[in-house]
Every structure is written in structure tokens, then in C-alpha cells.
Image (cartoon, rainbow, N blue to C red):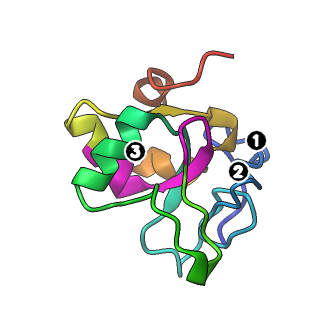
């Protein structure tokens, strides 16, 4: 795994344990070399985003009990793959993000100032 730092170069904060998220299913958007999709962006799911995601082939909302996956619902936090987040930006469908819980590796793809434009207002 890479160093668990967020986009502020501080300790990466947990994203969600209910539903359990992250590539490593540890509640964190940590990443490593085995995480080719780089599930680094902690998002706030909305109905609009989940519908968009389903339409483009990344169905996050349908439960898959055989994998212990309950499905993501509006209001849930979820670690989204970098590519899926960037595609959502291109289509004007990007969800809000929790910067303290978003891995620093995303900054290789998008600058912090742009990312701040998607930040959840706290």
C-alpha cells in the first residue's frame, strides 16, 4: 500500500464502514500497486450519480449478497475509482467528495484546486 495520506498531505481519514468501502474493504480509500482502479476518491453518493454510474456500466447500487455487498444508496460515502470520477467530471455528473478521506494519489490526475470545487461543504 502507498502511504495513507490525503490530498492535504495529512493522515488519510476513513471514508465509510457502513457500507464497508475501499479496495481493501477496510473503510479507507487507501491505494496500492495491486489496486489498478485506484479507488482513491471518497464520494457522497446521490441518486443522480448512482443512476449515471449505472448507465455507464459501473452499477454501484445493486446489492450482490454473494459478495457481502448491500449496494450503495444515496447519502452513503464510497471510495470511487479515479477513472470513474474523472469520467463523471467529463460528463458533468461528478459527485461531491470528502477531501480528508480522499487519497493523495488522485493529485496525479487532477489538481487540488479543481478537486476543491467538488468538496462537500462542511
Q: Secondary structure at mark 1?
A: loop
Side of 83 where 96 appears, left or right: right
Residue nearest the viewer, comparing 19 with 64: 64
Q: Residue at x 43, y 74 (%)?
A: 36
Residue 83: which quarter of the image? bottom left
Circles 3 and 1 in contact, beta carbons < 8 Å: no
Query: Badge 1: how crowded within 10 Å, few (<14), some, or many (20+)?
Result: few
Q: Which residues are magenta?
A: 73-87
Whether residue 63 can be seen here: yes
Whether 81 is among the magenta residues is: yes
| Rendering coords of residue 49 (x, y %) | 38, 38
CB atoms of marks 2 and 1 within 8 Å: yes
- Residue at screen point 77% across, 45% down: 13
Q: Nearer the viewer, mark 2 or mark 3?
A: 3
The residue under the point 42% across, 50% down is 108
In this figure, which residue is indicated by the disc labeled 3? 50
Measuring from the top left, give residue 79's x and y in whole percent: 57, 53
| Near-viewer residue (52 or 63) | 63
Inspect the magenta stretch and tell me whether residue 108 lies in it: no
> Residue 59, how many percent across, how many down?
37, 60
Q: Residues within 10 Å of mark 3 (few under 14, many from 20)?
A: many
* Rendering coords of residue 121 (x, y %): 61, 16
The residue under label 2 is 5
Q: Quick check: 72 above or below 70?
A: above
- Mark linked to residue 10: 1
Q: Which mark is residue 58?
A: none
* Residue 15 position (above or below residue 68): above
Residue 110 appears in the picture as rendered = no
- Tell me which label, 2 or 1, sits earlier in the chain: 2
Single out the mark in the foreground, 3 or 1. 3
SS category of the residue bearing label 2: loop
Amino acid at each position: 500500500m502507498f502511504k495513507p495520506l490525503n490530498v492535504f498531505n495529512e493522515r488519510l481519514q476513513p471514508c465509510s464502514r457502513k457500507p464497508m468501502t475501499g479496495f481493501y474493504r477496510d473503510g479507507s480509500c487507501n491505494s496500492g500497486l495491486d489496486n489498478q482502479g485506484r479507488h482513491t476518491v471518497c464520494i457522497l453518493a446521490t441518486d443522480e450519480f448512482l443512476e449515471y454510474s449505472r448507465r455507464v456500466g459501473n452499477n454501484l447500487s445493486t446489492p450482490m449478497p454473494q459478495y457481502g455487498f448491500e449496494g450503495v444508496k444515496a447519502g452513503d460515502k464510497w471510495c470511487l475509482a479515479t477513472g470513474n470520477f474523472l469520467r463523471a467530471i467529463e460528463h458533468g455528473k461528478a459527485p461531491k467528495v470528502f477531501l480528508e478521506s480522499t487519497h493523495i494519489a488522485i493529485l496525479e490526475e487532477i489538481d487540488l484546486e479543481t478537486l476543491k470545487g467538488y468538496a462537500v461543504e462542511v
